Image: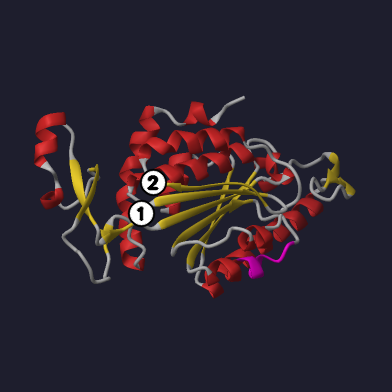
Amino acid sequence: MRTLQDIFTKEYLLQLEKLSVTLRQRLSVDGYSGARKSHAKGSSLEFSDFRDYIMGDDLRRVDWNSYGRFGKLYVKVFMEEKQAEINLFLDCSTSMEKGEKFLQAKAITASLAYVSLCSGDRVNLFLWNDSIILEKRGAAQKNGFFELLSLLDKAESSGGSNLLRAGLYSGKLGRGISFVISDFFSEAPLEEALRVLLGKKQQVCLVQVLASEEEQPKEGQAVRLVDSETGETCDLELTPSVLRAYDKALKEHRAALGELCHRSGSVFYGMKEDTPLFSAMREIL
């Protein structure tokens, strides 16, 4: 069975670093800029720290003395510069375990974490099902990425799915972006959950990940469908008419998610477990 360690090769991490500029530009437009100038008055020229150079940084901020000593580019960070918060909510309910859906969802979460850290922003990770089951706050350096990767690799799916409780129990969140990665197969009120996150000054992005057989079931099978979260069962023969009805219901479900996001000023993305990971990341960012 593949793990995140198999996916996050040196080559893939280098690809993701190119996307950090895209995220920085997006945050700058929305005013959530990490390691960028704040409009707050104060000691704007007070030196704070160094961080790795990222393509697109102002070359006037490069510390050339450090380059001469270490052969690596660093930029100076001043007190006027603030980090954005990137909050990653990963659905760990039982329904996520179908096929490689959970692995894809974990990989998207980890990819967003890495790009955010490369952009100089702070990452908070929340694993949730019926409520939050694990949280890791305050990752702010690239060298903290592999701790997040390890937590995600060990995460297991269980229980139901209630984003509303997860949002309520996530506590105080700094202004930033919340990415919610889930299949969104839940009866819990999603609109209220969005309202909670938006009330915490979040720009919300919903990322739906489905298994291939959820996207396109095979015709001709007699199946017993079991709701992995409630235990309810339903016996079906997958005839052409049943599959057409399923396809219609799935499209309506996605359309409803998209409409909900549109009304709330949020964003929705849909993908499958076998969507090429870097392509998915490019679409999201």
User: Percent x, y for residue 125?
Assistant: 53, 48
Is 119 in front, or is 257? Answer: 119
Question: Amino acid type of disc 2?
Answer: Ala
Q: Nearer the viewer, mark 2 or mark 1?
A: 2
Within the magenta stretch, is there residue 42?
Answer: no
Mark carried by residue 170: none
Residues shaded magenta: 188-193
Disc 2, SS: loop
Residue 250 located left or right of residue 122: right
Crowding at mark 1 (Cα within 10 Å: few <14, some 14-19, many 20+):
many
Q: Is residue 153 above or below residue 255?
A: above
Whether pointer 2 and pointer 1 mark residues with C-beta atoms closer than 8 Å, the reply is: no
**Label 1, on which residue?**
23
Instruction: Tell me the chief SS of the magenta region.
Output: helix
Q: State the residue at coordinates (41%, 42%).
A: 114
Left or right? Give the position of 53 relative to 93. left
Q: Which mark is residue 140?
A: 2
Residue neighbourhood size for the residue with mark 2, other residues' Cα within 10 Å, grouped as few (<14), some (14–19), many (≥20)? many
Residue 269 position, x and y percent, is: 53, 56
For label 1, the SS is helix
Q: CA distance from mark 2 to mark 1?
A: 15 Å
Q: Amino acid at mark 1?
A: Leu
Q: In the rendering, at what x and y percent does residue 263 appear?
A: 55, 75
Horizontal side of residue 140 vs 110, given as left or right: left
